[in-house]
Structure formats: C-alpha cells, structure tokens
Image (cartoon, rainbow, N blue to C red):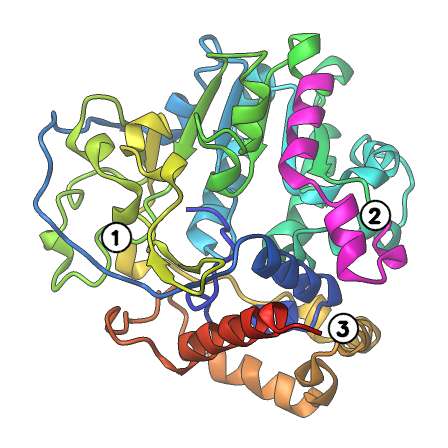
Amino acid sequence: MGNPTIRGTSLDTPAERACRVIWFCLAILLLLTVLVPSISRAETQQPAKPVGSEPTPEPAIPAILSFDKYEVVAMPQGHGMQDLDNFIFSLIRTPAFSEKVNDIEVEFGNSLYQPMLDRYIAGEDVPFTEVQKVWRKMGQPASGASAFVEQFFPLVRALNQKLPTGRRLRVLAGDSPVDWDQIKSLDDIIRLVHRDASIASVMEKEVLSKHRKALMLFGTFHLMHGTGASAVSLYEKDYPNLTFVISELGTLDTDLPTLSSSPLATWPIPSLARAKGTWLGALDLGRFLPPPIRIDQDCNVHREFPKVLQKRMEDLVDAFLYLGPQDLRLREKLPADIALDVNYRMELQKGGARFGFPEAATETAKEFDQQIVNSAGSPLFVIPKPQNPNLPDAELSREVQSCLDRKSRTSTPQ
C-alpha cells in the first residue's frame, strides 16, 4: 500500500538497515513523529466478505494503458517489493507504453535537480555519479538504497534512445526542491519539505496544464482520492475526474494456510480489477494495512486511521493490482553498488550520527556485510506477525510515558 511511515511494520533487511543510517531518513522519521505521533502494530483481521459483486480481473498492462479515458494513471512503486519492481519495468518496456504516455512522475526524485535529470534522460553526457543526486539527496530516504531506483533512470534513458524524438519519455521528479546538504535541523525539514504539495504542483504545471499524459509512481497514500491532503486530492480540486488510481493489495490474504484459500487464487498473474461495486472495493482500509497506533496530546492511545481514511476502498482508489500469491512476494535486495561503496556508506553513517543516532555511527562494515549474508535465507517480503493489540509492548509504554513526562514538564510552573 505504498510507503506510510509507521513504525513497527518494517523489515530488518540490509536495504532497510542502510536506510536507517541515512541522516535525512532519520530526520523524516522525527518529523513524522512530531506531526503525527504514531506507532504501528500489525493487526490482522479476516472478517467475512462484504456485500458486492465479484471483481473481474483483466490483463494488467492493457488495462493500465487505457489512457483514452484518463490523463493520469497513478500506481504504487516498489517500496521493497521485487514483484512490483518487475511489473513496472515490464510496463514501461511495453512498446504501446510510449505511444500512450508522455511523462512519468516519480516519488524517488528531488525536483531541485530536474534540469540535470532532463539532460540525463534525454541521453546527454551526464555522469551517473552526478545524476544519483536526484534520488540520493531527497526526502524519500529508501530510494537511496533501492535497486529499483538505481535501474529505473538508466532504463528510461536507454528506452528513449530507441524512440523517435516526439515520443521520448520525460521523467518528472516529484519531491520537494530542497538542497539536503544544507539541512541542519528538524526545523529546516518542517519549513522546507512539503512532499504532497510539491508532487501536486509538478503534476499541475508539467502535465495537466499542458494536456499531457502521465504515469505516477508513488506510495498509495499520496494517490488516494478524497483525503484532502494527498497529492492527487490536492490537484483534483482543479483537475477532477482525470486520474485513475491503482492500489496493490497490502496485507490482504497474507498468512493463509494454503495458496488456494485465497479468493484471488484463480486470477491471472498479473491482473487488474476495478474496485467500484465489488466486495473488494467495499472493504475498508484496515483490511489492507494495519491502522496506526496514535498517541494524542493527552497521551491517550488510539488504534485507528484518521477520519478521512475511514472509508471503503472504492472511495479511495479505482482498481487493485494483483501480482500473485501475497505470501510469496519477493523482497528487493540491497544494490551491490551501495554495499560496496565504502565512501557512500560512511557518508550515511556520519549523517546519522550528526542527528544523534549512535547506531548509525557504531555499526561496523563487517556487521553490515553480515546482515547482507544473513538476509539471503529470507527472500520473501514478509510482514511481521501481529502482537496482541490489547497489551502495549515496551516501546509503546515508553512512548506513552514520554508523552506524560513532556506534559508534566509543560504544566509545571517555572
């Protein structure tokens, strides 16, 4: 379901460990803790199917390429899911794609470097080490350790060399235009980083106002209709009914006893199913993603999505992408160029230490390498088993106590 930053559901893979030592990754996590204090626990629930028609799976790529009805097709990027990475690569390499699409707006790009990115994608002589700034210096930290991202930009560049000039693709970086080398504090991030507003602005200026066609690759929470704050919701105020939003299936049908237990087991791979009027579209968001645990200003614990997300999925998205059995999804591996790049790893560690995270500075190269070796035995994208939601664990108890301590200090006369 994209990339909501909710603690407690991430996997401890080498890529994610690399992400944890990226200084802006840590800063973003702090930012989200300040703005929306939350901790997440997986809360698996499998109630009966709601009322609705049976979803009809269609061949995914032809369905996505139905740009005659929409200006924009918006879908999730990989976020560590190798199957989704592979599908996106297949989609953009389909010959019909460049006949239908002008632009691809991506989450994993700093719009500050758009001019350089344009030159690179157009085939000009731009050193790869320079264009890496587009995704290594931005507010979506996981992109700095993503094999998918490392391959995506060179692939589009190579694809353009096979296309007539008038059909060449443009890649639009959607993230806030921020010089991350100048970020010194959390206040700088709060002041400068406005991700959904930036994504919406790029889409309005470069695509919708020019009547071009675009594919959007973002975490699903940036794409949902009718939430008020998502990028799609922001630009739909002026450009309604032009965007077709696709979601993947999140935690739905995970941890089943057999593959045939899933009602989706007979669907072709890959396939797309429309949400409207179906029992799948009638499900709420909690069937696809564990709701966050939020601690409010009075230190009370809440286990629910914000009100704007407490809707049927058909009110938030238009279709679902099915890539095969949910329990057999593959996990993206850490790129070798990052694992072997000692200087880059040191840069990540120094940045993490600068923001007061000792783990970033103390993890040795040997420990990092061992994590990569250990991960080879666990190739699946697995969501951790849920804990009892009625028994707060030590981390949640610490968060509540920290909230109480802050409240006590604030209320104590000086």
For the residue carrying disc 2, how many other residues have a C-alpha within 10 Å: few (<14), some (14-19), or many (20+)? some
User: What residue is at 20 percent from the left and 26 percent from the top?
Assistant: 56
Q: What residue would you read off at disc 1?
A: 325
Alpha-carbon distance for marks 1 and 2? 36 Å
Please identify the quadrant where the C terminus is shown.
Answer: bottom right
Circle 2: residue type? Val
Circle 3: residue type? Phe
Q: Which disc is residue 187 wearing? A: none
In this picture, residue 12 sits left or right of residue 254: right
Q: Which comes sooner in the sequence, label 3 or label 2? A: 2
Q: Which of marks 1 and 3 is in front?
A: 3
What secondary structure is marked by label 2?
helix
Q: Find residue 324 and report its horizontal and vertical position in percent.
A: 29, 48
User: What residue is at 67 percent from the left and 91 percent from the top?
Assistant: 366
**Visible in this render: residue 384?**
yes
Q: What residue would you read off at disc 2?
A: 131
**Residue 268 vertical position relative to residue 214 in the rendered view, above or below:** below
User: What residue is at 81 percent from the left and 75 percent from the top?
Assistant: 354
Q: What stretch is highlighted in magenta?
A: 179-205
Q: Which comes sooner in the sequence, label 1 or label 3? A: 1
